[in-house]
Image: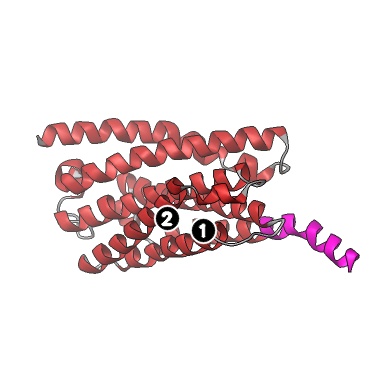
Amino acid sequence: MALSSHHAFEVFVAIHIITGAPGLVGFWIPVATKKASPLHRRAGRLFIWLMLATACSAVILSCLSIAAPVETHPHLVGHPQFGDAETIRGIFGWMMLYLAILTINLAWYGRLAIRNRLDHAKNSAWHNVALQGILLMASANCAVRGFLVGQPMMVGISLVGFATVGTNLWFMWRKPGPVDWIREHIKALIGTGISVYTAFFAFGAVRLVPELALAPVLWAVPLIVGLWLIIHHRAKVAAPFKRRKMAAE
């Protein structure tokens, strides 16, 4: 049983890397290229599907970690930072599950925001609303589990999920302005990049240097860079609309 869990975990780690690595690199192509250009669209679509595949494999990895924390992470047993089964289950099970669901939520929401730009009502499709409820539960669970195992990082990172659900529903259930759909598209897909880079630094580091896995700087860098990109690109796409509005007045 233990051997089977470990082998299954390693198989899905390989799948996770195969889809995640090109996604991490490909993230920068739509960020850097001209919006609505053919390259931007092709790279953006590829990024979304790679991230959805990567996050789905992360869901399986997290479930294996929840079911068999010691068997899937034998190198952490006895480690002063992650030594007991409940801590391993909390960080590599429940928190990884939360980050995977966050990634799925943002990637799918960002895809719908641009696909439904001419029919905003479709953004409130049942599966998109359901994703918000699932993320809300995953965020709350991550916070509670983090409190129980004494990991404030888990509590802190859960706040991103609560904020994501709130802002997503706010957009979905109101009448948007002419530029809101692209601003939400930018927020969601750069947010997807933040989520995946955060998981990459945290869970990737633990396989090489476990002591660095929960280092605040590894969590802060993707968040700071990502937030700057969101603010910058949202302001950039909104600028022409503001100039036309000012000219009309």
Query: Which amino acid does the dot numbered 1 rest on?
Result: Asn
Residue flagged by tag 2: what amino acid is it? Gln
Helix, strand, or loop for circle 1? Answer: helix
- Classed neighbour count for the residue bearing mark 1: other residues with Cα under 10 Å, few (<14), some (14–19), many (≥20): many
**Whole-percent x and y of residue 222?**
50, 56
Residue at the image position 21 percent from the left and 67 percent from the top? 148
Assign a secondary structure to mark 2.
helix
- On the question of residue 85 being in view, the answer is yes
* Magenta highlight range: 232-249
Is residue 189 in view from this perspective?
Answer: no
Q: Earlier in the sequence, mark 1 or mark 2?
A: 2
* Magenta region includes residue 98: no
Horizontal arrangement in the rendering, residue 35 relative to residue 16 (left or right): right
Q: Quadrant of the N terminus?
A: top left
The numbered disc on residue 132 is: 2
Using the image, determine if residue 244 lies above or below residue 101. below
Which quarter shows the C terminus?
Answer: bottom right
Q: Is residue 140 shown above or below 237?
A: below
Q: Which residue is labeled 1 in the image?
A: 168
141 or 219, nearer to the observer: 141
Q: CA distance from mark 1 to mark 2?
A: 8 Å
Q: Magenta-highlighted stretch: main secondary structure?
A: helix
